[in-house]
Amino acid sequence: MERAPIFNTRKKSGSFSSSSSVGDEKHGLLPLANHQKPKIRVRTLLGHCLYRRVIIWTIAVLSILGLTASTTGVRLRHGRILDFVDFGQGGPDSRGRGEEGITFVVTAPGRDGSEAQDSEPSYQDDQGDEEILHGWLEFRHLDGYFTGIKALVSPQHYTAEYPQPQGAKQTVPTPTMSRMPTPTAYVPYPDYDSRQYLDRYHEVEVCYLDKEKTTPAPNLYAYNGVVQGQPEPVVGSHSLLGLRDDICFDRFGRYGPYGFGYSNSDGGLEVGMDTEQEASHPVWAKTGKINYSGMDWGDAQDRCYNSNRRRFIGAGGDWSTHAPSGRAKISRTAIVVRTYIGVEWTPHVILNFRALISELALRSGGEYGVHFLLHVRDDDAPIWADAAVAQQVLDDYVPLEFHSICTLWSEAQMRLLYPGSFGESFSDPSNADIHGVYRSAHMPLQDFAMKHPEYAHFWNWEMDMRFLGNYYELFDRLGAWAKEQTRMEMWERAQKYYIPRYHGSWDNFTRVVHDEIITSGRGSVLGPVDFPGRFPTRAEQSGQTFLPHSCYRARNGDEMWNRCGVGEDADLITLNPLFDTDESGWVFAEDVTGYDRALPIPPRRCAIVTASRLSRRLLEIMHEETWRMHHAMFSEMFPASMALHHGLKAVYAPHPVYLDREWDLQSVDAAFNGGRDHSTSGHGSPFGFENEHNHKGATWYYHSEFAGLLWRRWLGYAQMDGRGDNGGRFGSGKLRGGREEEESRGATGRMCLRSMLVHPIKWENPADLE
Ligand SMILES: *[C@@H]1O[C@H](CO)[C@@H](O)[C@H](O)[C@H]1NC(C)=O
Ligand SMILES: *[C@@H]1O[C@H](CO)[C@@H](O)[C@H](O)[C@H]1NC(C)=O
């Protein structure tokens, strides 16, 4: 069937430019640009946007014309994974073999102006209803998300609209409309002043936003309680990971401390002021409206770290794990945010990164460091030769307050770092450069890790992710939970979505997985895997292993279970399951390069969405495999496959993910664990080309639609509710939410949600699209 490429022209430039799409940006580093003091004041944001829009529009228009002229295939919009698929077309060098004998031709980013395609995902650009049945569209839309804060109840009185245990059909009490509750400061940090903390660790010095030490990094605010009827996450769990589920966050409590809800003249960002704001003032009662003009986040991070350096392993080249006093030192984690030229730094984007830095780096006393890896697309730009050139890039493309935490990189730099031939790929659907960000996003991260020995772990993070909650709580709890997981059957648990209302407790889930392994007869993976053509790393050649001693000392199965890997920091933490790509139908399943193609393709694992935490030793292995063996795999697949090959500890952390509709739980499991052995692996995988649409109503997936809808409603903007005929479609239905509705008589006010990750957030304030 023929179909013209569909561009989502509804959206204007704002949505195009914030693409994490395809490939943009993954980060590398350039020491030069780091910590340079800005010389030239950045232009106003507005000036910026206009400038960029002209270029983006030009590219968009040209590429629309180009594609219309040259393409007849079905258009699939695939966030950053896949740009367009064209059945049966394309030259001999741009052809890959898909699962059911379909020939995929996927255009590489940057070659066809595809960045400009990055707009909100929509159902229309899916493969088409004629071919794929979107059964889930028939489920009723859930309403409970949109009830406001005046319906706040204590956890004992709360009943979720969804999900209910199988068979149960409880009625949700009608929300009571009462007075506005009062938020309180939310502090999910260790009690740094407590005896218990100080007995074990070094004192923590308070960190300030300013040099004069007048403004300590602020707290965000939360409400105690849950909004009546609000749905619970279907996949993943707060309580399992140690995230609070008895509190909720509104937009003022979350962002008010960082410049939301007050004007430029007060040092704010002048957003949120046009939304409903009843009783929002307690957020500023203690600190006042913080004046962020003149903020320099790199300077604040450095001051914070320097005043706390005694706390950390590796500070000043001292790698001891304990201070002379006997108190333990802790390791540090970098958050490495991939950014690129062309990102639109709207006030909401700025808020997100202020929150990230303040909550992770400053309020923690320097335990985390936040960095931007800024991808300079122009390979000819002499960003290393001349500081003024690098400075000009920053001046043109990055708000001044973030200049000092940017590291510039380019693909030309990756070609220099990893020279030599990588050989033929098993399949290369994108036909993109092996050193390019699309296929090898990890390369600049590897390099960053090699140049930053002060960090033990690295979160790869992207511009279009948001955490509705406190970032420290998220990252700290994920790390702690991952550390406690046993290595026994670790890969098998990690390949399956955890659906608490369906699987019961985590223990039950663990038993279910165990039984499935027995039934499958496939056995479970423990330690490094062998396969034809495998090369040992230098560490392996010298007899080292990554399996901890605890795995060798156990005398029986129970001991093995309780000890092997328990207490060992994870080398890889992902936010979606780690699936076996073989026969999964995932388009890039065989984009594997540098191995002997006469031999079977090596075993692989993959997690969609590159957001993940990688350990230094995993990055070292990846680095060595890249420069020494010339091995490469598609971006989402390389870290997990290296962890698999070398016996590193990898976990999928089942963070809370919500669905927009009332799926029955059986169907959730069937759709999301529909692969081999009731997992996400192999044939029937939810990440297969034909199954991915199931994620569109979820809050976390690269082409999710619900994430953006929910987020913007929570921010206080009216949105089309996506309801209507045939199950509704994104952008259709009625305009709901926003100031008028939230303020109307008898309404329950603004939304207050429990913590969650949302992705992708391509635009926030609808005004930014104009
Ligand atoms: C905010 O800080 C800037 C620069 O530090 C200063 O010029 C301005 O007057 C301050 N604004 C307010 C409202 O205090
Ligand atoms: C354990 O999980 C299985 C599979 O989902 C389910 O059938 C069973 O009821 C659960 N048991 C408990 C005690 O939750």
Image: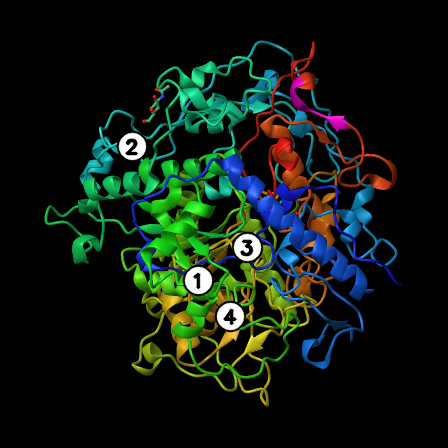
Task: Determine whether 95 is above or below 170 in the image.
Answer: below
The CA span between labels 1 and 4 is 46 Å
Task: Determine whether 223 is above or below 406 in the image.
Answer: above
Give me the residue at 20% from left, 54% from top.
321
The CA span between labels 3 and 1 is 52 Å
Q: Residues within 10 Å of mark 4 (few under 14, many from 20)?
A: some
Q: Which residue is mark 4?
A: 525
Considering the numbered disc 1 on the image, is that residue within a helix, a strand or a loop? loop
Considering the numbered disc 3 on the image, is that residue within a helix, a strand or a loop? helix
The CA span between labels 3 and 4 is 15 Å
Pointer 3 or 4: first along the chain: 3
Q: Which residue is mark 2?
A: 191
Task: Determine whether 411 is above or below 367 in the image.
Answer: below
Give me the residue at 50% from left, 71% from top.
435
Q: Residues within 10 Å of mark 2 (few under 14, many from 20)?
A: few
Asked which quadrant contains residue 95, the reply is bottom right
Q: Nearer the viewer, mark 4 or mark 2?
A: 2
**Rendered image: mark on residue 399:** none
**Horizontally, is 64 left or right of 395 in the view?**
right
Q: Nearer the viewer, mark 3 or mark 4?
A: 4
Residue 158 magenta-drawn? no
Residue nearest the viewer, comparing 117 with 134: 117
Pointer 2 or 3: first along the chain: 2
Q: Nearer the viewer, mark 3 or mark 1?
A: 1
Pointer 2 or 1: first along the chain: 2
Residue 738 magenta-drawn? yes
Where in the figure is residue 350, as x and y percent of width and height? 47, 37
Range of magenta residues: 735-739
Q: Which residue is mark 1?
A: 381
The CA span between labels 2 and 3 is 33 Å
The CA span between labels 2 and 1 is 48 Å
Where in the figure is residue 662, as x and y percent of width and height? 74, 38
